[in-house]
């Protein structure tokens, strides 16, 4: 299974059958999965990212006053505001014309700040930057750790990516039962994956899901254990305590 990059600096349309947002990864030419909105009651943008409509920076941004928005968020992030750091991470990672020049070093700085404060989408983007060497040296172990953080904080995209790594042992100890748990959680969050036939190298509506493929290899006891873990999963909240 392929991982997904929602960050959003590079976005490609992967298939006409995919609905919602489209996401792409530099990892391969194979189609990626489609993301649902993050677990939040806040409005979201077209990528499913949280937006605080009342935030002064967002008001500036919506009205096209991009320098004012960036200046406001920069000042607030320096004061420890997690949302401001998150939005700066998004903008420096995207590098949209007329807003700011793409700067992965700054994106990493701000996403890490927001991630440590408990924002799961920033945790995910830190993981993707470590995976692809954006603003930091490639480090698959760090990538897995940050995808894991976002997974435990309830982000479906993170749960899917972390599951793929647990399934193969990439950057983390291989654990197919734990992988099943996170695949199930991602699917419950609306993140099931593009139906892709790995043999024909084609999108196939009838292709099995990651959950189905994994369960073909597991025993009944392992399947029951993985699903029980998913049922008892509790979303982490608050600051990320890793330092």
Image (tube, rainbow, N blue to C red):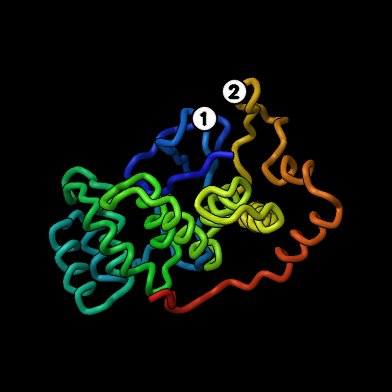
Q: Where is residue 122 in the image (x, y as percent from the top left)?
A: 38, 61
Up/down of 190 relative to 155, above or below: above
Q: Which mark is residue 30?
A: 1
Q: In this view, does 34 lie above or below 222?
A: above
Quarter occupied by residue 83: bottom left
SS category of the residue bearing label 2 = loop
Q: Residue furthest top?
A: 200
- Asked whether 100 or 19 is in front, the reply is 100
Q: Looking at this view, name the residue that lies furthest to the front.
A: 173
Side of 231 relative to 72 (left or right): right
Circles 2, 1 touching at the beta carbon (< 8 Å): yes
- Counting from the top left corner in percent of width and height, residue 51 is at 38, 63
Q: Is residue 85 left or right of residue 11?
A: left
Q: Distance between the residues labelled 2 and 1?
A: 7 Å
Q: How would you rate the neighbour count of disc 1 (Cα within 10 Å): few for under 14, some for 14-19, many for 20 or more? A: some
The correct choice, above or below, for 179 with respect to 24 in the image is below
Image quadrant in which the C terminus is located: bottom left
Residue displayed at 30% across by 62% down: 87
Is the residue marked by circle 2 packed among few (<14), some (14-19), or many (20+) residues within 10 Å? Answer: few
The quadrant holding residue 154 is bottom right
User: Which residue is labeled 2 in the image?
Assistant: 201
Residue 44 seen in the figure: no
* Rendered position, 170 above or below 108: above
Question: Where does residue 205 sit, x and y in percent of width and height?
Answer: 68, 30
């Amino acid at each position: 299974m392929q991982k997904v990059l929602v960050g959003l600096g590079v976005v490609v349309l992967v298939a006409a059958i995919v609905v919602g947002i489209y996401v792409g990864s530099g990892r391969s030419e194979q189609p990626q999965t489609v993301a649902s909105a993050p677990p939040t009651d806040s409005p979201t943008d077209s990528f499913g990212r949280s937006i605080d409509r009342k935030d002064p920076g967002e008001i500036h941004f919506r009205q096209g006053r991009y320098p004012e928005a960036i200046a406001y968020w920069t000042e607030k992030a320096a004061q420890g505001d997690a949302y401001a750091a998150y939005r700066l991470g998004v903008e420096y990672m995207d590098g949209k014309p007329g807003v700011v020049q793409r700067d992965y070093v700054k994106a990493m700085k701000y996403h890490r700040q927001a991630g440590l404060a408990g924002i799961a989408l920033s945790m995910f983007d830190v993981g993707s930057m470590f995976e692809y060497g954006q603003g930091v040296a490639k480090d698959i172990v760090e990538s897995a750790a940050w995808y894991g953080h976002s997974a435990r904080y309830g982000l479906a995209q993170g749960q899917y990516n972390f599951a793929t790594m647990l399934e193969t042992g990439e950057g983390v100890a291989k654990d197919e039962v734990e992988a099943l748990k996170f695949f199930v959680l991602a699917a419950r969050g609306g993140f099931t994956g593009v139906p892709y036939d790995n043999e024909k190298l084609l999108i196939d509506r009838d292709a099995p899901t990651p959950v189905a493929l994994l369960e073909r290899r597991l025993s009944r006891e392992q399947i029951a254990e993985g699903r029980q873990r998913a049922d008892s999963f509790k979303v982490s909240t608050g600051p990320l305590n890793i330092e």
